[in-house]
Image (spheres, rainbow, N blue to C red):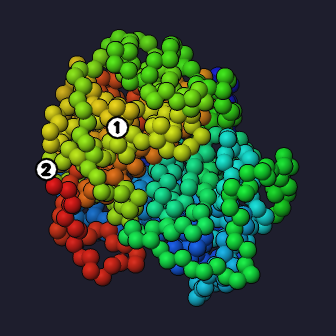
Amino acid sequence: MHTTPATSAPGAATSRYLAAMRDRGPLSIDWSAAPTRHKRYPGAERVRLPWTAGRHQGAGLLGELLRDLLGMTRIVWSHHLDDGGEPSGRPPMLLTGRPAPSGGGLYPIEAYVAIGEPLLHAGESRLPVGEPYLPVGEPHLPAALYHYDPVHHVLERLRDGDHVPALTGLLTDAPPADLAIVLSAVFWRSMFKYGDFGYRLICQETGVLIAQVLAVGERLGLAARAGLRFPDGEVDRLLGLDGTREATLAVLTLTLPPSGARPSSRSGEPRSQPAPSSGVPPMRPAALLADEPPTPSLAGELMSRPVAGESRPLPRPMPDGPAAALHRACALALPGSPPDGGAPYAAGSSGETAPYETGSAYETGSADGAGSAYETGSADRVGSRDRALRQRLPVRAGRTLPAPEPTTGANPAEAVARRASPTAGYRPVPLPGGALGAVLAAAGGGYPADLPGAATGPAATALCLLSLRVAGLPRGAYWYDPARHTLHELSGTVRIEAVTAGPLLANTRVALRGAAAVLIPVGDPVAGAGTFGDRWYRMQQMEAGLIAQRAALAATALGLAARIHSDGANETTDEALGLAGTPLRSLSFLAMGTPPTGGPLVTRPIPAPVNEEVRPAPTTT
C-alpha cells in the first residue's frame, strides 16, 4: 500500500523525484526477486498471428507490427565485459532478444490490442486453451480486447466487444481508428533492479516503442498516432489493470491502409493483395466511424463485462517512494488542452518569438541561466492550437554552422530488423557528414501525437550534439535547430573530453572510445507542469526515448550503429553542454558510430537467414 502523500502543486512530485535521483546511492540488486519478463492470460482464448504480413491483410499487418514491436525476434550471444571492455572470463549467455532496446533487457512494457470489426474471416485459427501451437490458416479476430503474448506470437482474448470507440473517446482529440494498441508498464519488472530510477527508464522505453510503432506502421502503410493525455484510471480499468502493479502509459490509434493500397515488405517491394473472400464484410474504414462518437456509458458498459485472469504469481506493486508518488501525480494531472486552447505558457516566458529566431531565442537570457529555458510559439508559425513549449538556448551560442545535408536513399522504417545495440563499441573512424545530417533530420522531425506542437518537431525537448569525429564538423558541443537544420556552437563550455570523467558504466566508456557522435535530448523537467501537471515529466521522457530510437533507426539504415546509454545523462554531461545552472538537463545519451566489421554475428534473427554469417560492412562512404 502506498503511503507517500500526493500533492496538488504542479511539478512538486517531479521535483522531489529528481532530488531523490540526484542523491541515490549504488544499486543493490536482489536477483531472486526478478519477475518474469512477459505475462500471460492462461485461461483466455488465443489467436495465433501471422509472422509476416505476406498475403495476409489486416491480421497479417497486425502480426508483423506486433512482432516488430515486442516479439521474440532474435537470439543474442552475450559476453560479460570488465571495466576495460575486455571479456571477463565468465561464461557467455544466450538470450532471446526483441526488436527495440530495453533498459537492462528487462522489457517492462506490455501491449494490449483493441480491435473493432473482424480483421479477416477467411478462416479460423483460434487455439484451444492449453494448446500454444497449431497449424493455422487466416486468423479470425472478432471485435474484442486482446493481450499480445510475445513468446508464442498470439493474441489472448480478454473481453468481447469493440473497445476502440471507448479508448479513442478517452483520448484528447483522437481521430477515428480501426484498432488501438495500449502500452502498459509492469513496474516491478524494471524497478526490482533499478529502484525508483526504473520509472524514468520505463517512460523512455515507452517513447522508444512509440517510435517503433510509427516506423513499422509507415512500412506497412498503417497510419498511427500516439495518445499521451488520457484519464489513466479509466483506461486502466478498461484493460483490467490495477494501476499499482501495471498501468497504462500510452495509447496508439491506427488506421488500415485505404482499400487497394499495397503496403511494403521489409525489402520495400509492394505486397501482393489477395482478393477479398466472397460474402465477407471488410473492416469498416475509420473514416466511416467519424460520425459515430462513443456514448458516455460505453467504457462503463465494457468494464462491467468479465475480463480474463492473468497468470500467477502476480508481480509486486510499485514500491512506495518518490517514483510511486510521481506516477500518482502523473495520473492525477488533467490531460486537457492548455487553458486558452492555444500555447501552454511557462512561468517566466514572454512574447511570441519563434524559438530559434536569431537574436532572440539564442540570446535572450544570460549565461547563468536567467530567464525561462522555454518560450511559446513555433518556428513555422503554425496555428495557436499547435503551439508548444519550445526550448531556447540558456547560454550564449558561438558561431552558427549549417548542419550537413542528409544522405538520401536510406529509409529508417526498413532498419527495424537490423537495429541492434553494439556490445563492443565502434571503429574509431570519422562519421560521414551526410550520415549525421540524416540522423539529425530524423531525430528533429515531427511526429503524430496529442502533445501540442509535436507535428512540427520535438515539443518538450531540444537536441544537443557532441561531435567527436565527424567529417567536416569541428570537434565540440552543439545545439541543433531542426527548423533551420543548423548547428549552434556552445561556447564557454568545458572540454567535451570531460564527459568521460562522469559517472559512467563500463560499456559507456568503451563506446565513447570509438563513437563518432553523441545525440543528447535535453529539457526542463518542470517547465510544462503549469499546464500539464507532473504528467509533463512523463511526456518529456517519452519524447526523449522517441527521439533516441528514431535517430538509432536512421543510423542503422545507413549501416551505422547506435546505442542508448542512460548513465551518460548526468551532471558532468550537463556541464559539458553549458547547462549547469540552467533549468535544462540531459535526458538521454545516444552514442553512434561505425560498427566493427567481420567476425560472427552476436545477434541472429529468428528465423535466421542462411546466408548471413558475418556482419555486413557499412554502406556509408
Secondary structure under tag 1 reads strand
The residues bearing labels 1 and 2 have C-alpha atoms spaced at a distance of 21 Å
Pick whichever, 217 or 582, lies toward us.
217
Write down the residue under mark 2: 429
Q: Is residue 498 above or below residue 428?
A: above
Q: Can residue 260 be seen in the rendering of this structure?
A: yes
* Residue at 28% across, 61% down: 80
Kind of residue at disc 1: Ile
Q: Label 2: few (<14), some or many (≥20) within 10 Å?
A: some
Kind of residue at disc 2: Val
Q: Is residue 593 above or below residue 348?
A: below
x and y percentages locating residue 131 in the rendered image? 64, 84
* Residue at 66% across, 31% down: 337
Q: Identify the disc placed on residue 520.
A: 1
x and y percentages locating residue 21 in the rendered image? 46, 33
Quarter of the image where one finds residue 132: bottom right
* Residue at 24% across, 76% down: 613
* Residue at 85% across, 55% down: 301
Q: Label 1: few (<14), some or many (≥20) within 10 Å?
A: many
- The reply to whether the C-beta atoms of the residues labelled 1 and 2 are less than 8 Å apart is no
Pick whichever, 238 or 247, lies toward us.
238
Query: Is residue 91 left or right of 186 when viewed as pictured?
Result: left
x and y percentages locating residue 388 in the rendered image? 53, 29
Pick whichever, 395 or 218, lies toward us.
218
Quarter of the image where one finds residue 240: bottom right
